[in-house]
Image (tube, grey):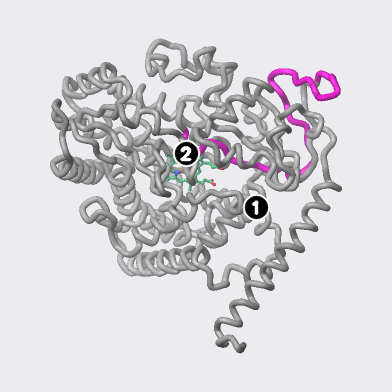
Amino acid sequence: MVLPLHLSESWMLTLIAVAICAASTFLLAVLRFLRRDPHVRGIPGPVYEASWLYGNLPELLLSQPYEQFVLKWQRQYGSTYRIKGCFSEDLLFTSDPATIRYILNDPILFDFPPSRRFLALMLFGEESILAQGTGGKGHRHIKNAFSPAFSPARLQLYVPFMRDISRKAVDKLMEQYLKSERNNSEEAVVDILDILQHVTSDIIGELAIGHNFNATETDGGDEIARSHRSVVILGSKRSKSAILGDSLLPRLPRPILKWIVTLPVQPFKTLLSFRHMTDEWATQLLRENLEDEDDKDAGLIGFVASANKSKKRERLTFQEISRQTPTFLVAGQETTATAIGWAIYELAKSPAWQDQVRKEIIEAQDTTDSSLDKLQYLNAHIKESLRLHPAVPHTERMAFEDTVLPLSRPVTTDSGRVITQLPVRKGQTIYFGVASYNRNPSVWGSDADTFDPLRWLDGRCDSQNLQGSIGPYSNLATFAGGSRTCIGWRLAVLEMQVVLLELILRFRFKINPEQAREITSCFALTLLPVKVESGKSSLSLLVQPI
Ligand code: HEM
C-alpha cells in the first residue's frame, strides 16, 4: 500500500523521533547509573513508592492533594531528603532554610537545570529572563533594566485600571449568579476560576504590554489571550508520559531538539504559534515606541524601551526587551489567578473571618491606591494564603560545581552517620520545596499546617521570631529569592489586594457543602484549588451578593 506522501513523511519523522528518544533513554539510564553521587544516595528518603522509570515524580507531581507526599516525607525524613527521579536518579529535596538560602544566593554555583532553561528558550526565546543563566551577564542586565518598571510608584499608576477590571469581574459574577439556580438562602453555586483567569489576563496584558485582551468582558479575549490560554492548558496537562518527556527531551542534543520541535504535533504547534503571535505583537509595539517619544500606552515593556533609548551604555537589544512579553504573560497570569483563587477559597471556609475582613474594608476611610497596605486583616489574609498555598509549590536548581550544602539541622544518613553539611557533586539536581518550606514547623512553629491569618498580626511572624527568612515578601518562599526572585511579586500582591477588595465588598463566599471534599490542591502548571472532573478544573463556591 502506498501512503500519501505527507502521511508517509510524518510517519517516518515520528518513527525517527521515537528511535532517537529510545536511544537517549538508554544512554541516559547508563549515564545516571555511572554518575550516582554517594553522598546524596546515602540520605534517607522514600524509596518504597518509587518506580525505576518514573521515580517518585508521579507522587510529587500527580498526587492530589499536592501536599499529600511532600508533607508526609517532610514529617518522616525532616527538611532534607532524597527522592528518586526518572531512571532512578537521586534528587535532593529540601525545605531547610540554611540550605535554601545558600542555594538561592549563589547565582553562579546554582541555577535552573538546563531542562528548565530549554523550556523557556523554546517558549519565549533565548533572550527571555527565564532562559538566561544567572551565572552570565545577560540575566542581571535584563533584570536590572526591568526592575524599575515594577517599583511601587510605577505600579500604583495601574490601580485604577485594576479596579476597573475587577468591577467587570463583579458584573460577570453577578451575571452568572443571576443565571444560576438559587437555594433558600439566595445563594447560587458559581465557578469562579475562569473569571479570575480572565481578570488576571486582562491586568497582565495591560500592564506588561499596554494591550487590553478584554478577556473578562468577552469570556476569553482576543487571539493572543486565547493562544496564551492554550499554552497554559498545555502546560497544565500532567501525566506519567509528560514526566518522562520533560526528563528526556531537554537532554537531547540541540540540533535534534530543534528538529523535533518542528514536528507537526499539536503541543509544538501551540507553543510556536504563541511565540510567533507574541513576537509579532511585541515587535509592532516596540517599533511604535521607537517612533513615538511619549508612548504612554505601551505598558512595562514600553516604559523599559523608553528608558533604554536614553541610555548611553549597556542598552538592551530589541529582542532583550520584546522577549519579555510572552515571559511576563505566562509567568504573571496563571500564578496570580491561582493565588486569588486560594484566597477566596480560604475566605469561603471561614465565614466569620470573612465578615471581619469585609468590615475592615467597609470601615476604612480610604481604600485607594497606597492605603491598601493599611488594611491589616486583608493583608494578613493574603500573606497566610500565599504561605499555605504558593502558586509555584517547588522549583529546581542544579549545582554547577562540586560544593557543600549547609544544613540547619543534622541529618542521619542511611549508614547511621550524623552529618551537619552535605557535599554534592556538579550536576546534582536539588528541589527547593516552596510549599514544604512555607509549612516547615521548624520555621513557622508546630501549627505551620493550619490556616491562621492572625499569626501575621500578633508578632509570631515577625522576622526576629522566625527561624528563616528567604523571600522578598514577609519571609515567605512563595516568590523564591536571590537572583531569580520573582520580578512581579509586588504586582501580584497589589493585584490580589485590588481584586479581593472589590469581590469581598460585593459578594459573600461560602463552601458548597456538596463539593467541600472534592476541592483539592492540584499541581497543573501552578498549584490550583480545584475539583477536576472529565479533564476540566473548576472552583465552584456558593456566592451571594451583598
Ligand atoms: C502570586 C503570584 C506569583 C507567584 C507565586 C510567583 C512565583 C514566582 C517564583 C517562585 C519564581 C521563581 C521561580 C524559580 O526560581 O524557579 C518566579 C519568577 C518569576 N516571576 Fe513570578 N510569581 C507570581 C507572579 C508574577 C507576576 C505577576 C509576574 C509578572 C511579570 C511574574 C514574573 C516572573 C518572572 C519574569 C520570573 C523569573 C525571574 C528570574 O528568572 O529572574 N511573576 N515567580
The residue nearer to you, when weighing 489 against 233, is 233
Q: Residue at x 68, y 38 (%)?
A: 430
Contact check, label 2 and label 1, Cβ < 8 Å: no
Residue 468, quarter of the rendered image: top right
**Magenta residues, start to end:** 390-418
Instruction: Give the class, few, some or many, for how many residues have Cα within 10 Å of label 2's Cα (few <14, many ≥20).
Output: many
Residue 417 location, quadrant: top right
Q: Residue furthest top?
A: 458
Q: Residue at x 59, y 30 (%)?
A: 69
Kindly identify which residue carries mark 2.
Answer: 522
Residue type indicated by callout 2 = Cys
Q: Can you see residue 106? A: yes
Identify the residue at image location x=75%, y=61%: 24
User: Amino acid type of disc 1?
Assistant: Leu
- Residue 321 image offset from top left, x and y in percent: 46, 59
Give the side of residue 147 with respect to residue 480, left or right. Answer: left
Q: Residues within 10 Å of mark 1 (few under 14, many from 20)?
A: some
Classify mark 1: helix, strand or loop. Answer: helix
| Residue drawn at 31 percent across, 30 percent down | 514
Q: Is residue 109 visible?
A: no
Q: CA distance from mark 2 to mark 1?
A: 19 Å
Task: Name the one closer to the observer, 179 or 305.
Answer: 179
Residue occupied by mark 1: 244
Residue 215's label in the rendered image is none
Q: What is the quadrant of the N terminus in the image?
A: bottom right
| Residue 394 place in picture, x, y as percent | 56, 37
